[in-house]
Image (spheres, rainbow, N blue to C red):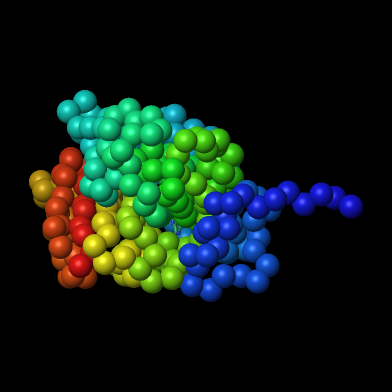
Amino acid sequence: MTPVAARPAALDRILALLADPPADPDTGAGYLDLLGPVDEPAPTLAQSVMRSSFLPRIYERVWRPVGFNLAKGWPAGPDTAAEQALLRRRLGLGARRPCRDAGTGDRPDATVLDIACGPGNVTRALACGVGPGGLVVGLDAAPRMLARAAAEPVPQDGPAIGYVRGDAVDLPFADATFDAVCCSGALYLFADPWAALDAMTRVLRPGGRLVILTSRRPRLPVTGLTVSTAGRAAGIRVFGDAEVTGALAGRGFADVRRDRYPLAQIVTGRRV
Ligand SMILES: C[S@@+](CC[C@H](N)C(=O)[O-])C[C@H]1O[C@@H](n2cnc3c(N)ncnc32)[C@H](O)[C@@H]1O
């Protein structure tokens, strides 16, 4: 008989957060798969790149720093480490940089969701602002991204970290489950970003914080039009300055604020 590997404890904790937990959870790939076989073709060029076997291999070392740092206005804008510290701070997590060692006091034992986590780069960065009693969940739809995320070692002195294959637009979690929700580098990929925002709001507990890192349309009309047109062709939506802040305010978020960069924005709010 083939021995069955024990399910990581983090996945058991995640199963307890689901609105409708499966009777026979599929965790064989190292993450909880709630979507099953991939049979639909990718709807856009950008989404097919996300699903490729190539991007996960170069994402963290090349694609992410080059693409995102340029969008944030490198060298004037924050580099990856400064951006990650900012995300943690906006979410009310421990924000020290580099991440603090175990045993220090400013890391809450929070339950955190990282939506569209890709290979887990932001998930792990959030985890280093969470205490050892906390739980950080990365959710993505792309199996190859998740395989990479799940293969990364989890620091012993930090919170539990686990990954779920699910749809950001139809989050599988029960209402008011998370203390903090992050969606970095993905709102612009979703077919319906506003439905995704509704789902993020639903799973956030009252008082919990949401942070979104997404695209931004430059104000200069010609540049703005060029960026939007190129984005649309690739399947990337480029958000206007007040679009995402307005969407949070319209959903009753308080303390809505935006950090603005040439082609990117970080929007934060607190659920009332
Ligand atoms: C550019 S990566 C972002 C990775 C990471 N969050 C970051 O900031 O670097 C975008 C991710 O969004 C995921 N994604 C796109 N649409 C999705 C959806 N509807 N549900 C879940 N994940 C989705 C893709 O699979 C991809 O891994």
Q: Residue at x 15, y 62 (%)?
A: 254
219 on left or right of 62? left
Task: Judge whether residue 4 can be spotted in this image.
Answer: yes
How many numbered marks, from 0 up?
0
78 on left or right of 241? right
State which quadrant residue 240 falls in. bottom left
Would you place residue 25 above or below residue 8 in this image? Answer: below
Would you place residue 47 above or below residue 68 in this image? Answer: below
Q: Residue furthest left?
A: 220
Q: Nearer the viewer, residue 87 or 213?
A: 87
Q: Nearer the viewer, residue 52 or 138?
A: 138
Q: Residue at x 59, y 39 (%)?
A: 151
**Which percent across, then down, holds residue 26?**
66, 60
**Which percent across, then down, holds residue 85?**
28, 37
Q: Residue at x 27, y 33 (%)?
A: 96
Task: Judge whether residue 45 can be spotted in this image.
Answer: no
Q: Residue furthest right?
A: 1
Location of the C terminus (image quadrant): bottom left
**Which percent across, then down, holds residue 11?**
57, 55
Q: Nearer the viewer, residue 148 or 254?
A: 254
State which quadrant residue 199 falls in. bottom left
Q: Residue at x 37, y 44 (%)?
A: 130
Q: Nearer the viewer, residue 134 or 175?
A: 134
**Which percent across, then down, holds residue 56?**
52, 39
